[in-house]
Image (cartoon, rainbow, N blue to C red):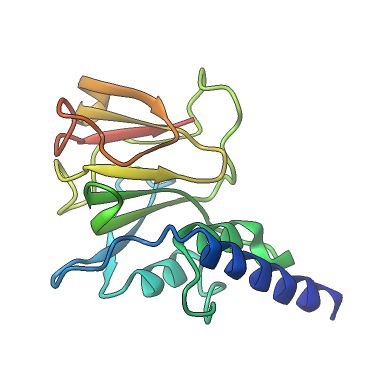
Amino acid sequence: MRQLHRAITAIAALALIGIAAPTAPASAAEGDTYCVASASSTAPQAVCFATFDKALQFASGGVLYDLPKGSGTAAKVEALNAGFGINVVNTVISIEYTGSNFSGSALIWSGTAGKCSTPTGNVDYQISSMPAGWNNVITSFRTYANCWVKHYESNSYGGAVIGYGPTDSYIGAVMDNQTSSQRWS
């Protein structure tokens, strides 16, 4: 009962944070999709949904549901990663967007090893190629769970690269629509 009370309190607090500092993706254009892929997989496959909330619910393994309307992206992800006092299998480590300023279609990356470690000299997660439909389409990204992400132009971590960064509303001209592999630290 105490865990349920803590979970409800955490949801309410995070919902208020989300309302006070909205970080939800810009309004979805018709045709935007919201996908989830595992950075713990050697060959990640994206599972896609019509809404961001459905994708995030899937990323949570069904743990995250019915957050109050107006809860921002950050509040939802933090609630998921906090685990509501239960064992959570997946941790959201980043969300990649096809548009600038966190707009357009979104790819939610999750991992099973928990939060990233603090130093960027090691690799906590990596994917050597993007899931189908997600190669060369990334324009902005947000990171979570203490992770920073590095974007590579080519498969298997080759070509141009943008160094580890926490969040960027525009990835830059060199890497805009060029990401083919990623690492998180």
Give how far across and how far down residue 134 sits, in percent: 19, 49
Q: Residue at x 19, y 66 (%)?
A: 32
In the foreground, 41 or 9 = 9
Q: Residue at x 21, y 42 (%)?
A: 139
Looking at the rendered structure, the number of numbered marks drawn on it comes to 0
Q: Is residue 160 above or below residue 134?
A: above
Q: Is residue 72 left or right of residue 83?
A: left
Q: Residue at x 54, y 77 (%)?
A: 67
Instruction: Check the image and name the residue furthest to the front.
Output: 20
Q: Residue at x 58, y 70 (%)?
A: 15
Q: Is residue 31 left or right of residue 87?
A: left
Q: Is residue 104 above or below residue 125?
A: below
Q: Is residue 145 above or below residue 28?
A: above
Give how far across and how far down residue 176 sits, in percent: 16, 35
In the foreground, 164 or 21 = 21
Q: Which quadrant would residue 3 be assigned to in this image?
A: bottom right
Q: Which quadrant would residue 116 be assigned to in this image?
A: top right
Q: Is residue 75 left or right of residue 84?
A: left
Give how far across and how far down residue 83 sits, in percent: 65, 62
Dividing the image into 4 quarters, which one contains the N terminus? bottom right
In the foreground, 65 or 37 = 65
Q: Which quadrant would residue 140 be assigned to in this image?
A: top left
Give how far across and how far down residue 97 sits, in percent: 27, 51
